[in-house]
Image (cartoon, rainbow, N blue to C red):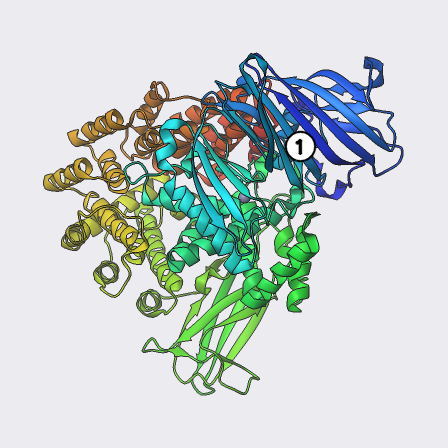
Amino acid sequence: MDQANPQTIRLQDYRAPSFAIGTIDLTFDLGEAFTTVTSVLNVVRERPGEPLELDGDELELVSLKVDGRKLSHEDYTVTPHSLIVPVIGDRAEVEIVTRIRPQDNTQLSGLYKSSGNFCSQCEAQGFRRITYFLDRPDVLSRYTTTITADKAKYPVLLSNGNLIEERDLDGGRHLAVWEDPFLKPCYLFALVAGDLAHIEDHFITSSGRDVTLRIYTVAEDADKCAHAMESLKKAMKWDEDTYGLEYDLDIYNIVAVRDFNAGAMENKSLNVFNSAYVLATPETATDANFNAIESVIAHEYFHNWTGNRITCRDWFQLSLKEGLTVFRDQQFSADTQSAAEQRIGDVKSLRARQFPEDAGPQAHPVRPESYIEINNFYTSTVYEKGAEVIRMMQTIIGRDNFRKGMDLYVARHDGTAATVEGFAAAMQDASGVDLTQFKRWYGQAGTPHLEVRGAWDAGAQTYTLDVKQSTGPTPGQPVKLPLHIPLAMGLLGQGGQPLPLTLDGENTDGPLSRVLDVREPEQRFTFTGVAERPVPSLLRGFSAPVTMDAGYSRDDLAFLLRSDPDAFARWEAGQTLATGLMLELIAAVRRGEMLVLDPKFSAAFESVLTSTDLDPALVALTVMLPSQAYLAQQMAEVDVEAIERVHCFVRGELSRRLRDDFRGIFDRLNDRGAYVFETAAVGRRSLKNVALSYLMADPAPEIVALCRDEFFRADNMTDSLAALTALASTDTPARQEAIDAFYAKWAANPLVIDKWMSVQALSDLPDTLERVKALMGHEAFSMRNPNRVRSLVGAFTQSNQPRFHDADGEGYRLLADVVLELNKINPGIAARMTGGFNQWRRFDDKRRALMRAELERILRQPGLSKDVYEIASKSVAGA
Ligand code: B3K
Ligand code: ZN
């Protein structure tokens, strides 16, 4: 492969395509030995003098015709990645026949088989694995797709758009023709053929269109689609109400498949989903799964406008559709569930995934400038930081202007392939707010840091806030420019009351909360008429994706935790308090001192736990300690053992000191009524299960017995999995008993067995690595199924910090072995797993050396995919 000389693709080299392809007529002859694809393209020259150069990957060319004339071998060139026709007119009809072997396609990109059925995944560059084409998102065409297949084996034949013909053929075969009236890029093409069951419902759009909604699955899963269907209808209604965006066809199909590289795919009118984001019953799925399904179903639906009707000019613009659509799905979940919990969850996930990415060797801007393999750029930066950039725009220009900006964006760009510049221009033009400086967020990598200091002048009755911003260097970007950062804030008086925020020079009383526009490296804001010493509440709602040092004392934080009217800021104060305390304890461990937990901390913790006016879900979120990985991010050099020891110590202390509180909560909330997925019930289960996990942090035998009972009596997966998780980290006979019983009960349900794998991979007991290795040899494990690999190896290497980083380096060896094996099967998943090494430079010398050696071993492997090569080589080169 081109590993020795992998090609870097750069944004600055973008050129519009030399040819347009107005229509494409596809015929699929699906077979067991091979599948024949006939593609008829109407090409129109856009630039004189250039050959027609089509992309292809692992294709067998059978024949090629131009304007009805069969070309001979001298008339064209085939390379491993292209088909070049040097001489062609300004308009031509090109007919290409290729042969592919979906049954051998383990990369799960292009056309492949899952559970015996045909399905496709074309984003980003899978279409070129089906036929030769201009595989780039700025080539928009009208698709007609004919599918022929054995009728008994593949009774269901689906593609994009409307079904215009269906009939039986000789020899037990049948045919279906689908026509998509909308222009689309080839990454949105989809085909599904198989023996599938479905459920059906309808949605009437605001202008009266009756849309048939169907969800297809393998027969045994058809009873698990009701929640996904409800979610789809909610999302359709929300997009009409919130953005005036209506669905545009009479049919919307979703197909759930078990083998899928990503979460789901927004193909026009034929979404293909990882079954993990479709299937749910109370017995088999947790509250978190129900939530994730609602949000992914909504996300893919929202793409119909932000992604499909308006797509990306090139893959550097990926965040144009992904960041915006994540923002939209976050807004949807905030509106339909609880806004505060949603925001806390989004921020936790941003900090857990995006902040380390931005501080490590793979750091890149929301709009990257170059890539080797585009699949490596479906990142938390493009998705989640991209969503934060959109959210900041909304905060800066205001909600009403944001809606006007969306309307203008749609009016200007519908039916085209757009850029982030175009989006920002619509927002700027609709609002009249200058976004020139703001747009730097798209081009500049790294997490900005704010240092904020406040001073009250009793004599002048003023309060000044001095704000400094800085962004550290990232690979390829040594120097950073100041950003436009919206800083939402308030001031609280001694009694917790909000004070008016009147900026110097304003002559009426200001509002009780406001957004400061931070634009300079150092900037001062002066508030007048401040009659008492206030406590500032800063970065409310996490108004910008930054880290912040606000110089808070513990008393300030305890005060904000009690009094801040902003629910996010209250949670944040609790987290900052706990993080500071745990970092001090870590320093104490390193000095060899005895550990003592400050009684003020457990008292503040207890008052949250026992507060009756707080929503149980928010209590649960507030009493969850910062993760070991989050503590690691705060240290100059990660001390794995000290972090684990302190985490365990604080949990154990809280468990002992507050046992009665935890027990009280557990008993009070452990109602035995029927499961409902509804915000309040989810909150109660969440707090109850947090209480159980604290009780199990230092369990007396009767607590183990309680947890064991809970496991065996639970009638829903949320409670069952919470009890199993607690048992899995407890060295008692009940542990193995529960693990075995769970497997025996759920062996036939792949998504539940994924959970079973993860629970064991996440245990903090010392034998976890051995268990993971044993599970890799278990009959239920397969390297070919991405969900299985992620649930076992991904969970262990990415979410079990103490065991993956055990000092002997065995975890590192295991990960490199898995990467090398996966490299041959599915390079995309292999590259994802390689990311487990990204933080290697942040550890101690010994671990650094061990991880580096494994990365180098990976890089020495002959035949390394460019996917893995890009991640491993950037990791070694370092930040
Ligand atoms: N657009 C797809 C992602 C496809 C991943 C390709 N490697 C799912 C989504 O973000 O909606
Ligand atoms: Zn998306």
Badge 1 element: strand
Disc 1 marks a residue whose amino acid type is Thr
Q: Residue at x 79, y 33 (%)?
A: 43
Residue 788, placed above or below residue 498: above
Total numbered labels = 1
Q: State left or right for residue 506 relative to residue 535.
A: right
Look at the image and tell me in which quarter the N terminus lies: top right
Out of 63 and 165, give the one closest to the viewer. Answer: 165
Above/below status of 310 relative to 733: below
Horizontal side of 399 relative to 678 (left or right) equals: right
Q: For this rendering, which residue is in front, 163 or 830?
A: 163
Q: Which residue is painted at 58% across and 63% down in the image?
A: 402
Q: Residue furthest left?
A: 702
Asked whether, in this view, residue 312 is left or right of residue 271, the answer is: right
- Decide if residue 717 is in sight here: yes
Q: Seen in the image, is 160 located left or right of residue 652?
A: right
Where the C terminus falls, by quadrant? top right
**Image spot of residue 442 (x, y percent):** 63, 52
Closer-to-camera residue (714/758): 714
**Residue 865, x across and y down, in percent:** 59, 24
Q: Which residue is mark 1?
A: 144
Give the quarter of the image for residue 698.
Answer: top left
Residue 303 in the image: state x and y as whole percent. 56, 46
Query: Measured from the top left, where is residue 346 in percent x and y?
Result: 44, 52
Residue 352 visible in the shown view: no
Displayed quadrant of residue 868: top right
